[in-house]
Image: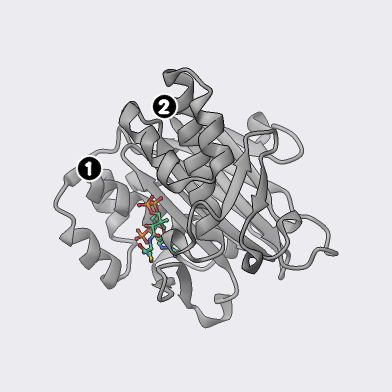
Amino acid sequence: MSRTGNLQLLKAHSAEEDRAAERPLRFERIDGDEAFLRVAVLDTSCLTDGAIAAMSSSLDEQKKSVAASIRSAPHRGDFIAAHFLLRRVLEDSLGIPRKLWTIDATEMGKPVVASPAAMSKLRISLSHTRGLVAAGVARGYELGVDVERTSTDATRLAISDRFFAPDEACYLRGLDPGAALNEFTALWTLKEAFAKAIGKGFGQPFHSFSFTLSEPPSITFFDPALGDPDVWRFWRAPYGRFHLALAYAPKDMAAPRAPVEVLWWKQS
Ligand SMILES: CC(C)(COP(=O)(O)OP(=O)(O)OC[C@H]1O[C@@H](n2cnc3c(N)ncnc32)[C@H](O)[C@@H]1OP(=O)(O)O)[C@@H](O)C(=O)NCCC(=O)NCCS
């Protein structure tokens, strides 16, 4: 068996209930054109060179060439793992072999499915940080995914004074340094997930929207071009030293909601 098939399920989450014990290792195949929203998270801290080489063989030539240009071996491994994971979720969910997917990007960098062309309405999102990667796929939803390692560098808090909304910066200033770094990373992860979901990345100023770290998190817009904040949903979870955040919005508010499925894997 290929080492890339050897993923151990750490935990599973669905928006309604935690059903880790019942979850299969793979995402189940989606029937017809049902709406769905799935995210796979992979702990890359123990990936061997052999596993990374096997994952790399699933990528298209353009992604292999980007990977080859990344000098840092850990960064290169995380890049390959994230793009492999995306193809794995696509193959499991849609039944189309992982090597047959071509992923392109918009002018702003948002990844999109180029082929198979019939799948171009899917929404996909990726994130890689040293030691953890995530890949999301949705139909019927806009979707943004972000993972970050909790910062240990207190000087990063100055970023919130320059780039966050004033209420977020004020909230962080009121915390002791340890808590502030954790909450800073939580806010940053949510902000990146949202910026990816709208396809703008850093092109959307990070002070033009603000998060409250309630459960679930909520958003306020200061830029009218962002539309109606009430259509957006957010989910976040810690994983060891890491934070994961999802931002998603149904394209049809009247349609029945699909469960949010998140699987966490580690190479065994
Ligand atoms: C997306 C972004 C906010 C986060 O990047 P990051 O924290 O460094 O890295 P992450 O690993 O979490 O995310 C990177 C992934 O986000 C995705 N991404 C990049 N730009 C994106 C965008 N505009 N919308 C949605 N997703 C985007 C890509 O899939 C990328 O991974 P890949 O290059 O391997 O395909 C940032 O890289 C960005 O804005 N990039 C766009 C280019 C840019 O700088 N534009 C600014 C114009 S002023």
Percent coordinates x, y for residue 152 in the rendering: 34, 26
Q: Is residue 77 left or right of residue 114?
A: left
> Which residue sits at x=52%, y=48%?
191
Residue 25 visible in the picture: no
Percent coordinates x, y for residue 167 in the rendering: 59, 39
Residue with the mark numbered 1: 74
Which amino acid type is marked by label 2? Arg
Mark 1 and mark 2 lie on one chain; the one further toward the N terminus is 1
| Number of residues whose C-alpha sits closer than 10 Å to that of mark 2, classed few (under 14), some (14–19) or many (20 or more) | few
Asked if disc 1 is less than 8 Å from ligand 1, the answer is no
Q: Is residue 23 left or right of residue 3?
A: right
Asked if disc 2 is less than 8 Å from ligand 1, the answer is no
Ligand 1 visible in quadrant: bottom left
Q: Is residue 76 left or right of residue 4?
A: left
Mark 1 and mark 2: Cα distance apart in space: 17 Å
Residue with the mark numbered 2: 241
Look at discs 1 and 2 and give the one toward the viewer. 2
> Which residue sits at x=53%, y=23%?
174
